[in-house]
Amino acid sequence: MVIFCGGLATRLGNFAKDTPKSMIKIGGKPFLEYQIEMLKKQSIKDIVLCAGHLSEKIIEYFGNGKKFGVNIRYSHDGEEPLGPIGALKKAELLLDNVFFTMYGDSYVFVDFKKVHSYFLQYDKKALMIVYQNYDKYDTSNIVVNNGIVTRYNQEKTTDMIYIDYGVQILRKKILKSIPKNTFFSTKDFFSKLTKENELLAFEVNKRFYHIGNLNALEEFKKYIEKCRN
């Protein structure tokens, strides 16, 4: 599993000025810890963190992951942000031939084994988990037709009812065409895959949580409080 932790958290303003977004504390522990606990419950214990902004705070807290029951390795953007796909290219030597990716601000409900098994049935380069969102929890940005993502993060249309759920599977070989040490956006990457008809869709029915903005952060806090009561 690769988790992207290099974002600058611009939508959170001063709230994340001096801490990485994934290290924002909720109920006494960082958001990333909730993600790691969720992955561990599904027997996912090998984790690569693509880190950037204030990465030393992540490393100081999590280290090699041993005290959390997982194995954590790190890949660093360097002085300039690379974007999620540029960060993947930087982490290339740490990746399996088929691997999951996950955004560092998303909390999801996924049967990872089931999704992995589904992906291996098809000869496609990538898979994206999608959710029928209808702009409810964030802006819907995907069109799905016959189990394939056909449009991603482009001009809004009435059939754009799905949203990127925050989890993907990729085949390592598709990183060959990505330039090294260069910013590369998810929009350009996934849009290219949609044009090639190479991006499978796997639909889930349970909403996601995220901490990408202040309202969403408060929602996740309420979810955690509810789980503890």
Image (tube, helix red, strand yellow):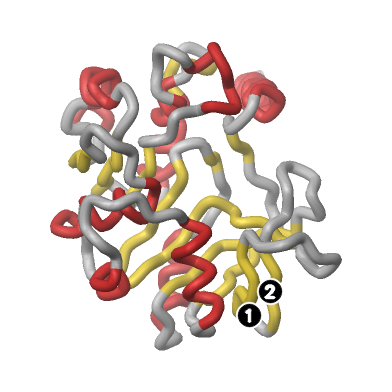
Residue at image position (40%, 12%) is 18
Residue found at the far right of this picture = 158
- Asked whether the beta carbons under mark 1 and mark 2 sit within 8 Å of each other, the answer is yes
Quadrant containing the C terminus is top right
Say above or below: 51 vs 17: below
* Image location (x, y in percent) of residue 75: 21, 42
**Mark 1 surroundings within 10 Å by alpha-carbon count, few (fewer than 14), some (14 through 19), many (20 or more):** few
Which amino acid type is marked by label 2? Val
| SS for dot 2 | strand
Say above or below: 60 vs 115: above
Residue at image position (53%, 55%) is 110
Mark 1–mark 2 Cα distance, whole angstroms, equals: 6 Å
Q: Nearer the viewer, residue 80 or 214?
A: 80
Is 4 positioned to the left or the right of 55 in the image?
right
Q: Where, by quadrant of the figure, is residue 173 drawn? A: bottom left
Tag on residue 147? 1
* Image location (x, y in percent) of residue 171: 32, 72
Residue at image position (53%, 40%) is 106
**Which of pointers 1 and 2 indicates the residue nearer the eye?**
2
Is 174 positioned to the left or the right of 221 in the image?
left
Q: Nearer the viewer, residue 218 or 185?
A: 185
Q: Which residue is mark 2?
A: 144
Residue at image position (56%, 62%) is 129
